[in-house]
Image (cartoon, rainbow, N blue to C red):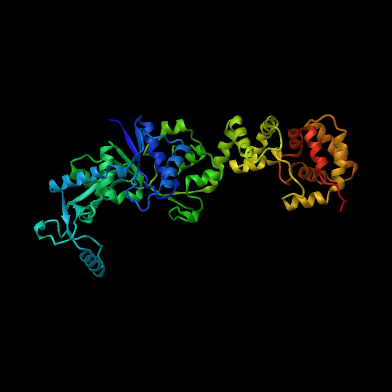
Protein backbone atom coordinates (compact mmCIF):
# COMPACT_ATOMS: atom_id res chain seq x y z
CA UNK A 1 0.00 0.00 0.00
CA UNK A 2 1.33 3.42 -0.90
CA UNK A 3 1.12 5.81 2.01
CA UNK A 4 -0.63 9.04 1.05
CA UNK A 5 -0.77 12.01 3.42
CA UNK A 6 -2.26 15.39 2.75
CA UNK A 7 -2.14 19.02 3.74
CA UNK A 8 -5.49 20.73 3.14
CA UNK A 9 -5.24 24.35 4.37
CA UNK A 10 -8.11 26.79 4.11
CA UNK A 11 -6.60 29.87 2.44
CA UNK A 12 -7.94 32.47 4.84
CA UNK A 13 -4.65 33.94 6.08
CA UNK A 14 -0.90 33.56 5.79
CA UNK A 15 0.69 30.19 6.58
CA UNK A 16 0.49 29.74 10.37
CA UNK A 17 3.40 27.96 12.04
CA UNK A 18 0.96 25.44 13.53
CA UNK A 19 -0.19 24.59 10.02
CA UNK A 20 3.42 24.49 8.86
CA UNK A 21 4.14 21.91 11.57
CA UNK A 22 1.13 19.85 10.43
CA UNK A 23 2.43 20.05 6.86
CA UNK A 24 5.92 19.03 8.02
CA UNK A 25 4.63 15.99 9.93
CA UNK A 26 2.56 14.86 6.93
CA UNK A 27 5.47 15.46 4.58
CA UNK A 28 7.89 13.53 6.79
CA UNK A 29 5.48 10.64 7.24
CA UNK A 30 5.06 10.33 3.48
CA UNK A 31 8.78 10.65 2.76
CA UNK A 32 9.69 8.18 5.51
CA UNK A 33 7.41 5.58 3.92
CA UNK A 34 8.29 6.44 0.34
CA UNK A 35 4.70 7.60 -0.16
CA UNK A 36 3.00 10.71 -1.51
CA UNK A 37 2.24 14.03 0.11
CA UNK A 38 -0.59 15.93 -1.51
CA UNK A 39 -1.57 19.57 -1.22
CA UNK A 40 -5.21 20.54 -1.48
CA UNK A 41 -6.36 24.10 -1.05
CA UNK A 42 -9.73 24.03 0.72
CA UNK A 43 -11.13 27.18 -0.80
CA UNK A 44 -14.84 26.44 -0.52
CA UNK A 45 -15.42 29.34 1.85
CA UNK A 46 -15.43 31.89 -0.95
CA UNK A 47 -15.92 34.87 1.32
CA UNK A 48 -12.88 34.19 3.48
CA UNK A 49 -10.53 32.63 0.90
CA UNK A 50 -8.07 34.98 -0.77
CA UNK A 51 -5.50 34.71 -3.55
CA UNK A 52 -2.85 36.23 -1.24
CA UNK A 53 -3.43 33.48 1.30
CA UNK A 54 -3.04 30.83 -1.42
CA UNK A 55 0.22 32.51 -2.45
CA UNK A 56 1.40 32.62 1.16
CA UNK A 57 0.77 28.88 1.52
CA UNK A 58 2.70 28.02 -1.66
CA UNK A 59 5.47 30.43 -0.80
CA UNK A 60 5.77 29.24 2.81
CA UNK A 61 5.86 25.55 1.85
CA UNK A 62 8.44 26.19 -0.85
CA UNK A 63 10.60 28.19 1.52
CA UNK A 64 10.44 25.36 4.07
CA UNK A 65 11.32 22.98 1.25
CA UNK A 66 8.21 20.84 1.72
CA UNK A 67 7.48 19.74 -1.81
CA UNK A 68 4.15 18.14 -2.68
CA UNK A 69 3.52 15.36 -5.16
CA UNK A 70 1.55 16.19 -8.27
CA UNK A 71 -0.21 19.50 -8.76
CA UNK A 72 -1.87 21.25 -5.87
CA UNK A 73 -5.65 20.91 -6.18
CA UNK A 74 -8.39 23.36 -5.32
CA UNK A 75 -11.43 22.00 -3.55
CA UNK A 76 -13.82 24.27 -5.45
CA UNK A 77 -13.01 22.38 -8.64
CA UNK A 78 -14.61 19.20 -7.30
CA UNK A 79 -17.88 20.57 -5.92
CA UNK A 80 -19.90 18.62 -8.49
CA UNK A 81 -18.29 15.41 -7.36
CA UNK A 82 -19.21 16.20 -3.73
CA UNK A 83 -22.83 16.82 -4.73
CA UNK A 84 -22.81 13.56 -6.67
CA UNK A 85 -21.74 11.62 -3.57
CA UNK A 86 -24.49 13.32 -1.56
CA UNK A 87 -27.00 12.24 -4.22
CA UNK A 88 -25.78 8.65 -3.99
CA UNK A 89 -26.13 8.69 -0.22
CA UNK A 90 -29.69 9.97 -0.63
CA UNK A 91 -30.44 7.22 -3.08
CA UNK A 92 -29.02 4.53 -0.79
CA UNK A 93 -31.03 5.80 2.15
CA UNK A 94 -27.88 6.92 4.03
CA UNK A 95 -28.90 10.54 3.87
CA UNK A 96 -32.15 12.49 3.81
CA UNK A 97 -33.56 15.85 2.94
CA UNK A 98 -34.40 18.05 5.87
CA UNK A 99 -36.99 20.79 5.33
CA UNK A 100 -36.68 22.54 8.68
CA UNK A 101 -37.35 26.24 8.41
CA UNK A 102 -34.94 28.68 10.07
CA UNK A 103 -37.72 29.37 12.63
CA UNK A 104 -37.92 25.71 13.55
CA UNK A 105 -34.18 25.50 14.01
CA UNK A 106 -34.17 28.59 16.21
CA UNK A 107 -36.97 27.11 18.28
CA UNK A 108 -35.05 23.84 18.64
CA UNK A 109 -31.97 25.74 19.74
CA UNK A 110 -33.84 27.80 22.29
CA UNK A 111 -35.62 24.84 23.74
CA UNK A 112 -32.34 22.94 24.12
CA UNK A 113 -30.82 25.95 25.86
CA UNK A 114 -33.80 26.34 28.19
CA UNK A 115 -33.59 22.62 29.10
CA UNK A 116 -29.86 22.98 29.68
CA UNK A 117 -29.18 20.47 26.88
CA UNK A 118 -26.70 20.48 24.04
CA UNK A 119 -28.00 22.13 20.89
CA UNK A 120 -28.73 19.21 18.67
CA UNK A 121 -30.80 18.73 15.55
CA UNK A 122 -33.58 16.40 16.64
CA UNK A 123 -33.62 14.37 13.40
CA UNK A 124 -37.25 15.27 12.80
CA UNK A 125 -36.99 14.69 9.03
CA UNK A 126 -35.02 11.49 9.26
CA UNK A 127 -38.06 9.26 8.94
CA UNK A 128 -40.69 11.72 7.80
CA UNK A 129 -42.27 11.23 4.42
CA UNK A 130 -40.88 13.85 2.01
CA UNK A 131 -44.40 14.31 0.64
CA UNK A 132 -45.01 16.29 3.84
CA UNK A 133 -42.42 18.83 2.76
CA UNK A 134 -43.59 22.41 3.22
CA UNK A 135 -43.96 24.63 0.19
CA UNK A 136 -41.11 26.93 -0.72
CA UNK A 137 -38.47 25.52 1.66
CA UNK A 138 -35.25 24.45 -0.05
CA UNK A 139 -34.04 21.39 1.88
CA UNK A 140 -30.58 20.66 3.20
CA UNK A 141 -29.20 17.12 2.93
CA UNK A 142 -28.24 15.43 6.19
CA UNK A 143 -26.45 12.16 6.76
CA UNK A 144 -27.88 9.43 8.97
CA UNK A 145 -25.58 8.81 11.90
CA UNK A 146 -25.99 5.63 13.95
CA UNK A 147 -28.50 6.12 16.77
CA UNK A 148 -27.00 3.83 19.39
CA UNK A 149 -23.84 2.00 20.26
CA UNK A 150 -20.47 3.68 20.32
CA UNK A 151 -17.63 4.47 17.98
CA UNK A 152 -13.97 3.94 18.75
CA UNK A 153 -11.24 5.48 16.70
CA UNK A 154 -7.77 4.02 17.14
CA UNK A 155 -5.96 7.28 16.75
CA UNK A 156 -2.25 6.87 16.05
CA UNK A 157 -1.40 9.65 18.50
CA UNK A 158 -4.31 9.80 20.95
CA UNK A 159 -4.80 6.03 21.26
CA UNK A 160 -8.33 4.59 21.36
CA UNK A 161 -10.91 7.33 21.67
CA UNK A 162 -14.57 6.41 22.08
CA UNK A 163 -17.82 8.36 21.81
CA UNK A 164 -21.40 7.32 22.29
CA UNK A 165 -23.08 7.47 18.89
CA UNK A 166 -26.03 9.39 20.29
CA UNK A 167 -23.55 12.27 20.54
CA UNK A 168 -23.19 12.38 16.77
CA UNK A 169 -25.77 14.54 15.10
CA UNK A 170 -27.14 14.07 11.60
CA UNK A 171 -24.91 16.81 10.23
CA UNK A 172 -25.45 18.66 6.97
CA UNK A 173 -23.80 17.42 3.79
CA UNK A 174 -25.34 19.85 1.31
CA UNK A 175 -26.60 23.29 2.21
CA UNK A 176 -29.96 24.56 0.96
CA UNK A 177 -28.20 26.20 -1.98
CA UNK A 178 -26.70 22.85 -2.97
CA UNK A 179 -23.13 23.63 -1.87
CA UNK A 180 -21.28 20.93 0.07
CA UNK A 181 -20.09 21.41 3.64
CA UNK A 182 -16.48 20.93 4.80
CA UNK A 183 -17.48 17.58 6.33
CA UNK A 184 -18.61 16.14 3.00
CA UNK A 185 -15.91 17.72 0.83
CA UNK A 186 -13.02 16.63 3.03
CA UNK A 187 -14.18 13.01 3.12
CA UNK A 188 -14.81 12.81 -0.63
CA UNK A 189 -11.53 14.48 -1.53
CA UNK A 190 -9.50 12.40 0.91
CA UNK A 191 -11.11 9.23 -0.40
CA UNK A 192 -10.70 10.18 -4.06
CA UNK A 193 -7.10 11.23 -3.41
CA UNK A 194 -6.31 7.82 -1.93
CA UNK A 195 -5.34 9.39 1.41
CA UNK A 196 -4.30 6.66 3.82
CA UNK A 197 -3.30 8.81 6.82
CA UNK A 198 -4.99 11.96 8.07
CA UNK A 199 -2.50 13.73 10.33
CA UNK A 200 -3.84 17.04 11.67
CA UNK A 201 -4.46 19.17 14.76
CA UNK A 202 -6.48 17.63 17.58
CA UNK A 203 -9.07 20.38 17.19
CA UNK A 204 -10.42 18.10 14.45
CA UNK A 205 -10.73 15.00 16.63
CA UNK A 206 -14.49 15.51 17.07
CA UNK A 207 -14.90 15.74 13.31
CA UNK A 208 -13.09 12.42 12.90
CA UNK A 209 -16.01 10.45 14.41
CA UNK A 210 -18.47 12.07 12.02
CA UNK A 211 -16.15 11.60 9.08
CA UNK A 212 -15.58 7.98 10.04
CA UNK A 213 -19.30 7.25 9.70
CA UNK A 214 -19.56 9.21 6.50
CA UNK A 215 -16.86 6.98 4.97
CA UNK A 216 -18.83 3.97 6.11
CA UNK A 217 -22.09 5.36 4.77
CA UNK A 218 -20.43 5.84 1.39
CA UNK A 219 -19.08 2.27 1.54
CA UNK A 220 -15.46 3.40 1.81
CA UNK A 221 -12.65 2.39 4.16
CA UNK A 222 -11.81 5.25 6.55
CA UNK A 223 -8.15 6.35 6.63
CA UNK A 224 -5.96 6.08 9.71
CA UNK A 225 -6.23 9.17 11.90
CA UNK A 226 -3.48 10.89 13.89
CA UNK A 227 -4.49 13.98 15.83
CA UNK A 228 -1.58 16.00 17.09
CA UNK A 229 -1.89 18.35 20.06
CA UNK A 230 -2.00 22.03 19.17
CA UNK A 231 0.83 24.43 19.89
CA UNK A 232 0.41 26.60 22.95
CA UNK A 233 2.17 29.76 24.06
CA UNK A 234 4.25 30.01 27.26
CA UNK A 235 1.04 30.90 29.15
CA UNK A 236 -0.60 27.60 28.19
CA UNK A 237 -3.10 29.24 25.82
CA UNK A 238 -3.48 28.26 22.17
CA UNK A 239 -0.79 30.03 20.15
CA UNK A 240 -2.15 33.27 18.70
CA UNK A 241 -1.09 36.76 17.63
CA UNK A 242 -0.89 37.74 21.30
CA UNK A 243 2.19 35.53 21.63
CA UNK A 244 4.06 37.32 18.82
CA UNK A 245 4.78 36.21 15.29
CA UNK A 246 2.56 33.35 14.12
CA UNK A 247 3.12 33.17 10.38
CA UNK A 248 5.99 31.48 8.62
CA UNK A 249 6.65 34.67 6.66
CA UNK A 250 7.01 36.70 9.84
CA UNK A 251 9.71 34.36 11.08
CA UNK A 252 11.50 34.56 7.75
CA UNK A 253 11.39 38.37 7.92
CA UNK A 254 12.83 38.22 11.43
CA UNK A 255 15.86 36.42 10.07
CA UNK A 256 14.99 32.83 10.95
CA UNK A 257 16.44 30.23 8.57
CA UNK A 258 14.12 27.64 7.02
CA UNK A 259 16.09 24.57 8.23
CA UNK A 260 16.13 26.01 11.76
CA UNK A 261 12.38 26.61 11.72
CA UNK A 262 11.76 23.07 10.40
CA UNK A 263 14.02 21.57 13.04
CA UNK A 264 12.26 23.59 15.72
CA UNK A 265 8.76 22.68 14.52
CA UNK A 266 9.75 19.04 14.30
CA UNK A 267 10.86 18.99 17.92
CA UNK A 268 7.70 20.82 18.94
CA UNK A 269 5.61 17.82 19.84
CA UNK A 270 7.84 15.06 18.48
CA UNK A 271 10.97 13.54 19.96
CA UNK A 272 13.65 11.05 19.03
CA UNK A 273 15.53 10.37 22.25
CA UNK A 274 17.37 13.50 23.30
CA UNK A 275 18.24 14.63 19.79
CA UNK A 276 17.85 18.37 19.36
CA UNK A 277 19.68 19.13 16.12
CA UNK A 278 18.10 16.97 13.47
CA UNK A 279 18.99 17.21 9.81
CA UNK A 280 16.42 16.76 7.06
CA UNK A 281 17.77 13.31 6.20
CA UNK A 282 17.73 12.17 9.80
CA UNK A 283 14.20 13.51 10.20
CA UNK A 284 13.03 11.47 7.22
CA UNK A 285 14.74 8.40 8.58
CA UNK A 286 13.46 8.75 12.15
CA UNK A 287 10.02 10.26 11.84
CA UNK A 288 7.15 8.19 13.16
CA UNK A 289 3.85 8.91 14.84
CA UNK A 290 4.86 7.06 18.01
CA UNK A 291 7.23 9.90 18.80
CA UNK A 292 4.43 12.49 18.84
CA UNK A 293 3.50 13.49 22.39
CA UNK A 294 -0.07 13.76 23.66
CA UNK A 295 0.39 16.95 25.63
CA UNK A 296 0.19 20.35 23.93
CA UNK A 297 3.61 21.59 22.91
CA UNK A 298 4.76 24.95 24.30
CA UNK A 299 6.26 27.39 21.87
CA UNK A 300 9.60 28.62 23.21
CA UNK A 301 11.04 31.56 21.23
CA UNK A 302 14.40 31.32 23.05
CA UNK A 303 14.85 27.74 21.91
CA UNK A 304 14.07 28.69 18.32
CA UNK A 305 16.59 31.53 18.61
CA UNK A 306 19.31 29.15 19.82
CA UNK A 307 18.62 26.65 17.08
CA UNK A 308 18.65 29.41 14.52
CA UNK A 309 22.01 30.68 15.79
CA UNK A 310 23.32 27.14 15.44
CA UNK A 311 22.11 26.79 11.84
CA UNK A 312 23.53 30.21 11.04
CA UNK A 313 26.99 29.18 12.22
CA UNK A 314 26.74 25.94 10.28
CA UNK A 315 25.79 27.58 7.00
CA UNK A 316 28.43 27.33 4.26
CA UNK A 317 30.56 30.49 4.15
CA UNK A 318 29.76 31.19 0.52
CA UNK A 319 26.03 31.18 1.16
CA UNK A 320 26.44 33.51 4.12
CA UNK A 321 28.62 35.90 2.13
CA UNK A 322 25.99 36.03 -0.61
CA UNK A 323 23.22 36.53 1.90
CA UNK A 324 24.97 39.54 3.44
CA UNK A 325 26.11 40.94 0.13
CA UNK A 326 22.64 40.65 -1.40
CA UNK A 327 21.19 42.64 1.46
CA UNK A 328 23.65 45.50 0.87
CA UNK A 329 23.68 45.46 -2.88
CA UNK A 330 20.27 47.04 -2.85
CA UNK A 331 21.43 49.82 -0.52
CA UNK A 332 24.53 50.57 -2.61
CA UNK A 333 27.86 49.38 -1.36
CA UNK A 334 30.51 51.87 -0.33
CA UNK A 335 33.25 49.65 -1.67
CA UNK A 336 34.13 47.44 -4.56
CA UNK A 337 32.31 44.10 -4.60
CA UNK A 338 35.48 42.02 -4.44
CA UNK A 339 36.68 43.96 -1.43
CA UNK A 340 33.26 43.60 0.17
CA UNK A 341 33.40 39.83 -0.37
CA UNK A 342 36.80 39.48 1.16
CA UNK A 343 35.93 41.66 4.15
CA UNK A 344 32.72 39.70 4.82
CA UNK A 345 34.58 36.41 4.48
CA UNK A 346 37.21 37.39 7.04
CA UNK A 347 34.68 38.89 9.42
CA UNK A 348 32.18 36.01 9.31
CA UNK A 349 33.66 33.89 12.10
CA UNK A 350 33.35 36.91 14.41
CA UNK A 351 29.95 38.02 13.20
CA UNK A 352 28.27 34.62 13.38
CA UNK A 353 29.43 34.27 16.99
CA UNK A 354 27.22 37.19 17.94
CA UNK A 355 24.29 36.98 15.53
CA UNK A 356 21.20 34.97 16.43
CA UNK A 357 19.50 35.48 13.08
CA UNK A 358 20.19 36.72 9.57
CA UNK A 359 18.86 40.20 10.33
CA UNK A 360 21.40 40.65 13.13
CA UNK A 361 24.12 39.19 10.94
CA UNK A 362 23.36 41.61 8.12
CA UNK A 363 23.23 44.57 10.51
CA UNK A 364 26.49 43.61 12.13
CA UNK A 365 28.23 43.62 8.74
CA UNK A 366 27.22 47.22 8.14
CA UNK A 367 30.57 48.68 9.15
CA UNK A 368 32.37 46.53 6.62
CA UNK A 369 30.43 47.74 3.64
CA UNK A 370 29.15 51.23 4.21
CA UNK A 371 30.89 54.36 5.40
CA UNK A 372 29.39 55.92 8.47
CA UNK A 373 28.84 59.63 8.21
CA UNK A 374 29.23 62.08 11.02
CA UNK A 375 27.40 62.91 13.19
CA UNK A 376 26.84 59.24 13.91
CA UNK A 377 23.37 57.76 14.20
CA UNK A 378 24.11 56.15 17.56
CA UNK A 379 24.10 58.99 20.14
CA UNK A 380 26.50 57.15 22.46
CA UNK A 381 28.97 56.68 19.64
CA UNK A 382 28.74 60.30 18.52
CA UNK A 383 29.34 61.49 22.08
CA UNK A 384 32.39 59.31 22.33
CA UNK A 385 33.88 60.76 19.14
CA UNK A 386 33.17 64.30 20.34
CA UNK A 387 34.93 63.70 23.62
CA UNK A 388 37.92 61.75 22.31
CA UNK A 389 39.34 63.90 19.53
CA UNK A 390 42.83 64.15 21.03
CA UNK A 391 42.98 60.37 21.55
CA UNK A 392 41.93 59.82 17.93
CA UNK A 393 44.66 62.19 16.79
CA UNK A 394 47.24 60.31 18.84
CA UNK A 395 46.09 56.97 17.41
CA UNK A 396 46.10 58.38 13.90
CA UNK A 397 49.71 59.52 14.06
CA UNK A 398 50.86 56.32 15.77
CA UNK A 399 49.18 54.15 13.13
CA UNK A 400 50.42 56.28 10.25
CA UNK A 401 53.91 55.08 11.13
CA UNK A 402 52.79 51.50 11.65
CA UNK A 403 53.79 49.31 8.73
CA UNK A 404 53.25 45.83 10.09
CA UNK A 405 49.48 45.22 10.18
CA UNK A 406 49.10 42.00 12.15
CA UNK A 407 46.91 41.64 15.21
CA UNK A 408 49.97 41.14 17.37
CA UNK A 409 51.90 44.15 16.09
CA UNK A 410 48.86 46.42 16.37
CA UNK A 411 48.16 45.21 19.88
CA UNK A 412 51.72 45.99 20.92
CA UNK A 413 51.67 49.40 19.28
CA UNK A 414 48.42 50.57 20.82
CA UNK A 415 49.22 49.25 24.27
CA UNK A 416 52.52 51.11 24.18
CA UNK A 417 50.68 54.25 23.15
CA UNK A 418 48.19 53.89 26.01
CA UNK A 419 51.05 53.51 28.43
CA UNK A 420 52.81 56.59 27.05
CA UNK A 421 49.68 58.66 27.39
CA UNK A 422 49.04 57.17 30.82
CA UNK A 423 45.60 56.03 29.76
CA UNK A 424 43.77 52.75 30.31
CA UNK A 425 43.73 50.72 27.08
CA UNK A 426 39.91 51.05 26.87
CA UNK A 427 40.23 54.84 26.63
CA UNK A 428 41.91 54.34 23.26
CA UNK A 429 40.20 51.20 22.07
CA UNK A 430 36.63 52.40 22.46
CA UNK A 431 36.93 55.70 20.49
CA UNK A 432 38.97 53.82 17.90
CA UNK A 433 36.19 51.25 17.57
CA UNK A 434 33.64 54.02 17.07
CA UNK A 435 35.86 55.81 14.53
CA UNK A 436 36.25 52.59 12.52
CA UNK A 437 32.80 51.07 12.81
CA UNK A 438 30.49 53.95 13.65
CA UNK A 439 29.21 51.98 16.61
CA UNK A 440 30.13 51.10 20.19
CA UNK A 441 29.55 47.41 19.46
CA UNK A 442 31.70 45.44 17.04
CA UNK A 443 34.01 42.44 16.86
CA UNK A 444 37.34 42.79 18.72
CA UNK A 445 39.17 45.99 17.76
CA UNK A 446 42.23 44.19 16.33
CA UNK A 447 39.95 41.98 14.25
CA UNK A 448 38.26 45.10 12.94
CA UNK A 449 41.60 46.69 11.99
CA UNK A 450 42.92 43.62 10.26
CA UNK A 451 39.68 42.94 8.40
CA UNK A 452 39.53 46.53 7.13
CA UNK A 453 43.25 46.59 6.39
CA UNK A 454 45.75 49.42 6.80
CA UNK A 455 44.59 51.77 4.05
CA UNK A 456 40.93 51.62 4.99
CA UNK A 457 41.66 51.94 8.71
CA UNK A 458 43.76 55.07 8.13
CA UNK A 459 41.19 56.45 5.72
CA UNK A 460 38.44 56.06 8.31
CA UNK A 461 40.57 57.72 10.97
CA UNK A 462 41.14 60.64 8.57
CA UNK A 463 37.41 61.01 8.18
CA UNK A 464 36.82 61.69 11.85
CA UNK A 465 36.03 65.39 11.87
CA UNK A 466 38.57 67.60 13.60
CA UNK A 467 37.33 69.74 16.34
CA UNK A 468 38.27 71.14 19.70
CA UNK A 469 38.81 68.47 22.30
CA UNK A 470 36.19 68.76 25.00
N1 LIG B 1 -9.26 22.97 5.77
C1 LIG B 1 -9.26 22.39 7.08
C2 LIG B 1 -8.45 23.28 7.99
O1 LIG B 1 -7.64 24.05 7.50
C3 LIG B 1 -8.67 21.01 7.00
C4 LIG B 1 -8.90 20.18 8.18
C5 LIG B 1 -8.47 18.74 7.97
O2 LIG B 1 -7.26 18.49 7.99
O3 LIG B 1 -9.32 17.91 7.76
O4 LIG B 1 -8.64 23.25 9.19
Residue nearer the viewer, 311 or 106: 106
Q: From this viewpoint, is residue 291 visible? A: no
Height in image: 250 above or below 116?
A: above
Image quarter where the N terminus lies is top left
Residue furthest to the front: 136
Q: Quadrant of residue 399?
A: top right
Residue 60 percent across, percent down from the top left = 46, 41
Residue nearer the viewer, 412 or 187: 187
Height in image: 349 above or below 150?
A: above
Q: Which residue is painted at 37% across and 45% down in the image?
A: 9
Q: Is residue 80 left or right of residue 57?
A: left
Q: Quadrant of residue 432?
A: top right
Q: Is residue 383 left or right of residue 6?
A: right
Residue furthest to the right: 420
Q: Number of numbered discs present?
A: 0
Residue 96 percent across, percent down from the top left = 15, 52
Q: Which residue is painted at 60% across and 33% down in the image?
A: 322
Q: Which residue is painted at 16% across and 44% down in the image?
A: 88
Q: From this viewpoint, is residue 58 visible? A: yes
Residue 38 percent across, percent down from the top left = 35, 37
Q: Is residue 56 left or right of residue 217?
A: right
Image quarter where the C terminus lies is bottom right
Q: Quadrant of residue 200?
A: top left
Q: Is residue 424 left or right of residue 339?
A: right
Residue 469 percent across, percent down from the top left = 87, 51
Amino acid sequence: MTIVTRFPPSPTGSLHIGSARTALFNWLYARHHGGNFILRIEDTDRKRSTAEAVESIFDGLRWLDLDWDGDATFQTSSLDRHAEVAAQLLENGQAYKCYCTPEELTEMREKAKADGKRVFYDRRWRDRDPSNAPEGVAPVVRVKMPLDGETTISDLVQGDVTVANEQLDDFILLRADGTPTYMLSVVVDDHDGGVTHVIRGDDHLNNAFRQFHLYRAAGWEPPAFAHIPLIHGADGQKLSKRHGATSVQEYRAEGVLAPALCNYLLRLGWAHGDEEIISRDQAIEWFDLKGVGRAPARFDPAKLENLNAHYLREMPTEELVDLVLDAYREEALDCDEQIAKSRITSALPHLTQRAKNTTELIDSANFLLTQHTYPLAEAKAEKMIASSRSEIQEIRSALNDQEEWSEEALNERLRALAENLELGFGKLAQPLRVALTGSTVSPGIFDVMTILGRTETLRRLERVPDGEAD
